[in-house]
Image (cartoon, rainbow, N blue to C red):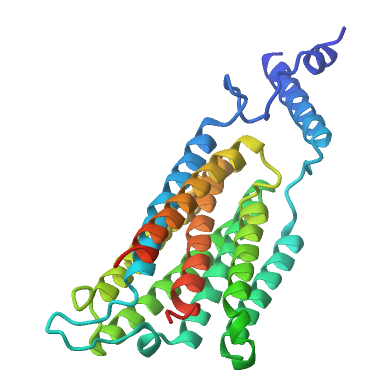
Amino acid sequence: MTVEEHALEHAAPGHHEARTSTGLDNVKVGMWSFLASECLFFGALITTYLLYRGRTLLANGQPGPTPAEVYDIPFTSVSSFVLLMSSLTMVLALAAIQRGDHGRTRVWLLTTALLGATFIGGQVYEFTTFVNEGLSISSSPFGSAFFVLTGFHGAHVTVGILMLLTLFGLSMGGRLPTENARTVEMVGLYWHFVDIVWIVIFTLVYLIPSE
Amino acid sequence: MAERSEELLERAEEHHAERVRARRGRPAQHPGPRAYVRIAVILGVITLAEVWIYYVDSLRFLLVPFLLAFSALKFSLVVLYFMHLRFDSRSFAALFVAGLALALTVFVVVLLIFGTFAG
C-alpha cells in the first residue's frame, strides 16, 4: 500500500481544515454560537420596539412624533440597499482571498468598509433629522425603543467596519496570506449577520405600519 | 516526507468531506462570483418590490404578509448563500436555527403577553 492509498484509506471524517474531536472547526462553531446569541439580543430589542412604537406621548403629556411622521422610507430604502450590496462585496472579498487574489481581496474589503461607512453616515443623518423633529432617545417610549434598537445595530456595523479596516491593513502589510482566509470568513459571517438583522429591522420597524 | 504525508492526508480528508457532502445531497463547492452577483441582483429586486408594495394603496391588505415573505426570502438567501450555510456542515445550521427559534419564541410569547393581554 502506498502512502497515498494509506492516507485515503484512513482519512478522518470531517473537514480538511478542522482536526477536532467533533470534526468541526472550533472557531466557526464559536462564531455561529455567538451569532445565535445575537439573534436573542436583537430579538429582544425588536420585540421591545414593537411593544412601544405606539406610545408616542411626550413626558409633558403632549403628543410626540409618530413613526409615520418621522420615517423617510425612500432614504432608508437606499441605506438598506447599500448595506445589502456590502454583503455582496464581502463575499467577493472572501472568494478572492480563497483563490489567492490579494489585490482584489483588498479592493473588496475596502469597498465593503466604505459601503458600511455610507450606511452609518445615513444613520447619523437620520438620527439628527429625528432629533430636530422632536424625537430623541428620552422623548417618548417610541423614541427610546427606536434609538436603542437602531443605535445598537449601528454600533455593530461600526465594529464590523473596524474589523474590515484591520483586515485591509493586515493585507496591505502582507500579513493576510491565503492560509488566513478563515479570518476573512469569520469577519464575513459577522458582517452578513449585521445585514440580515437590518433586513428584519427594515421590514418590521420601517415598512410595516403601526396602525 | 512528513510534509508529503501531511499534504496527502489533507487531500484525503478533502476527498472524504466531498463524498460525505455528496451523500447528503449538499453541494461541495461554494458558489463563484457570478452566482454571488446573481443573488445580489435578486436581493436588490426584492428590496425594490418591498418599497413598491409599500406605496400601492390597492394592495394595502396584502402589505404585511408580502413584506414578511419578502423579508424571510432575503434573510434566507443571505444566510444560505453569502454565509454558506447551504454548503457547510449541518451542525452550524442547527446552532444558528436553535438561536433563531429561541429568539422567535421569546418574540411571540412577549408580544402575546404584553401586546395582547396588557390592559
- Count of marks, rendered view: 0
Position of the C terminus of chain B, as image quadrant, is bottom left
Question: Which picture quadrant has residue A105?
Answer: bottom right
Q: Horizontally, is A173 left or right of A181 in the view?
A: left
Q: Is residue A174 visible?
A: no
Q: Quadrant of the N terminus of chain B?
A: top right
Residue, x 76% and y 63% (percent of image)? B34
State the image quarter where residue B77 is shown. bottom right
* Rendered location of residue A162, percent (x, y): 39, 58
The answer to which of B89 and B5 lies nearer the viewer is: B89
Residue B118: x, y in percent? 31, 64
The answer to whether A153 appears left or right of B12 in the picture is left
Which residue lies most toward the top here? A1
Please identify the residue farthest to the left as the structure is shown.
Answer: A60
Q: Nearer the viewer, residue A76 or A83?
A: A76
Spot occupied by residue A166 in the image (x, y as percentages of width and height): 42, 53
Q: As displayed, is residue A6 above or below residue A133?
A: above
Please provide percent x and percent y for residue A156: 38, 59
Q: Residue at x 46, y 81 (%)?
A: A209
Picture quarter containing residue B17? top right
| Front position in the image: A145 or A79 | A145
Question: Residue shown at 67%/68% (left/top)?
Answer: B40
* A92 vs A99: above or below: below
* Viewer can see residue B110: yes
